[in-house]
Amino acid sequence: MKKRILIVDDSFYMRTMLKNMLTDAGYEVVGEAPNGQTALQLAKETTPDLVTLDVILPDNTGLDVLKGIKQDNPDMKVIIVSAVGQEVIVNEAIEHGALAYIVKPFSEEKVLETVGNALK
């Protein structure tokens, strides 16, 4: 069965780029969320195998969304994909349960390798 992924990013362009990469690699994208509220709702409704999560969202921080996802479903796998690469934020995300942190701009190889490792 295909692994199911939820993409959370406020940028339509970034969501589309990730969706195309992941779909081409054989994953099923079960939802796209432009903000934190939608992300939490879709994470509950679609129960994806993995969530890609941006840190900067219009209504919330990615870290708050990460905490919310982990509170509802501690086993859900989350990878942060963000232009914010500050060590403090990276460390906080990992402390709160993110499996990996990809800094934008990224290569397709990096994304697919990180997603593949997370879903093993």
Image (tube, grey):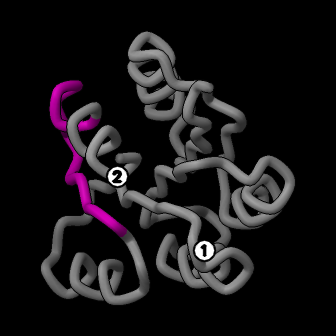
**Above-or-below relation of 44 to 48:** below
Residue at 33% across, 66% down: 99
Calculate the distance from the C-alpha at mark 2 to the C-alpha at mark 1. Answer: 19 Å
- Examine the rendered structure and indicate whether residue 66 appears above or below residue 24: below
Q: Which residue is mark 1?
A: 65
Eye-nearest disc, 2 or 1: 2
Pointer 2 with pointer 1, Cβ within 8 A? no
| Badge number at residue 41 | none
Label number found at residue 118: 2
- Eyeballing the image, is 17 above or below 117? above
Considering depth in this image, is 78 or 116 the residue closer to the camera? 116
- Image coords of residue 62 (percent x, y): 50, 70
Which type of secondary structure does the marked residue at label 1 adopt?
helix
Snapshot quadrant of residue 110: top left
Q: Position of residue 74 (x, y in %)?
A: 60, 79
Mark 2: secondary structure: helix
Whether residue 110 appears in magenta in the rendering, the answer is yes
Q: Residue at x 34, y 52 (%)?
A: 118
Name the amino acid type tagged 2. Ala
Quick one: 6 or 85, which is closer to the camera?
A: 6
Give the residues in magenta: 99-111
Q: Is 105 included in the stretch rendered in magenta?
A: yes
How far across and down, in percent of the image, does residue 78 sit? 46, 61
On the image, the x and y values in percent for residue 4 come to 61, 37
Labels 2 and 1: the sequence-earlier one:
1
Which residue in the rendered view is the most extreme toward the top? 24
